[in-house]
Image (cartoon, rainbow, N blue to C red):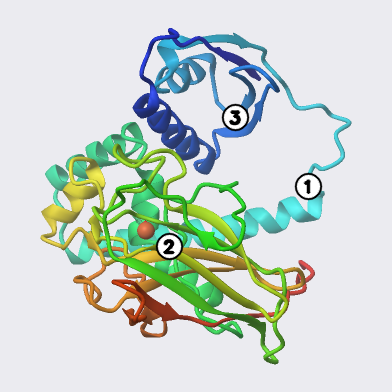
Amino acid sequence: MVQMEVRLPPEMEADDLKARERARSQELQRDGSWVHLWRVAGRYANVSVFDVGSPDELHELLSSLPLFPYIDAHVTALARHPSKLDQPTEEERRLMSERANQLISDILRRVHEAIVENEVTYEEYQAVKQWFIDVGEAGEWPLFGDVYIEHVVEKNAFGDRAGSQGTILGPFHLPDAPVLEAPYELPRRPDEQGDRTVVTGRVTDTDGNPLAGANLDVWQADASGAYSGFMPGPPEGNLRGQVRTRDDGRYEFRTVIPGPYTIPLDGPTGRLTAAADWSPWRPSHIHLIVSAEGHEPLVTQLFIDTSDYLHDDVASAVKDELIVHPEPTGKGDELGFSYDFVLAPIHAPVPVG
Ligand code: BEZ
Ligand code: FE
């Protein structure tokens, strides 16, 4: 457990540092090493639990935080308590190792086959090992996974689920975006670039019944392709917010058309993409998580039909059903499009074993 107190010099301009801190902390949470993060009420401080193998690893991890030079950290080593109830049973442990054995063996067998079929050389193997190290050091495993792996997991898990199509979550979602008030408008800068657009539609269940009070958690890049909280430029919270449906299941929010963007080109994921001569671009899209009580949350994206890269999205996440066609609404320069979301009923857990 680490208690961290952040002491920034009062005159310091720290927006960029804080954005980088948030991105790094979310990477560490996603990769499972930052297990709990609690704000200390009323102070610029937090209490965190890290899952690490050694004090050296903890030091390395803490010193990778952009705010590290300003953090006063107090570390307490925690061990598992034998009386804790939520440990897996013997049977659950056995099932988990069977599954691990099956998956790891299968993946390694396919890697081994690819090595033999392609006559991978020792030099290539050493280069790949260095690349693995670089991805870890750059904190890019979540990015690499979301670009090159997540789309298959998503299609396999949800491709034939009832209701609207979903697609990948990607690495740029931030939990706890502000819950907006009607008339809904994603927070944006006074001089925000990009075509103004209004997004409307309904959220229903699979029988067509409206879902009142359903939540649409919306986030997107700005017109230059930058996400707030991750990239320099947009202020914190820009183009992020939660919108609710009315009693008739309808929703409406205003925003701007986002720009297409590339995955970071200077890191190991970008280098791999360039080495294979693949396009690093994602087409313009708006991300949403649509949720309502008693229904499966829908993680999805709406793709702008006029965007480049719809047919060579680096993350392979475009589905025809998710392409929208903004058209002038007749109100000044405003564009608009409509999209109806259908949510599947909640999936009852299947008993294990
Ligand atoms: C995105 O949708 O923003 C995204 C998805 C995968 C990788 C990088 C970005
Ligand atoms: Fe995105």
- Residue situated in front as seen by the camera: 293 or 74: 293
Spatial distance from mark 1 to mark 3, Cα to Cα? 18 Å
In the image, the residue with mark 3 has its CB under 8 Å from the nearest atom of ligand 1? no
Contact? badges 1 and 3 (CB < 8 Å): no
In the image, the residue with mark 2 has its CB under 8 Å from the nearest atom of ligand 1? yes
Q: Secondary structure at mark 3?
A: loop
Numbered disc in front, either 1 or 2: 2
Report x, y in % for residue 177: 56, 48
Furthest-front residue in view? 332
Report x, y in % for residue 109: 38, 62
Residue on which disc 1 sits? 88
Marked residue nearer the N-terminal end (1 or 2) = 1
Q: Disc 1 residue type?
A: Pro
Marked residue nearer the N-terminal end (3 or 2) = 3
Q: Disc 3 residue type?
A: Asp
Spatial distance from mark 3 to mark 2, Cα to Cα? 24 Å
Residue on which disc 3 sits? 51
Residue on which disc 2 sits? 150
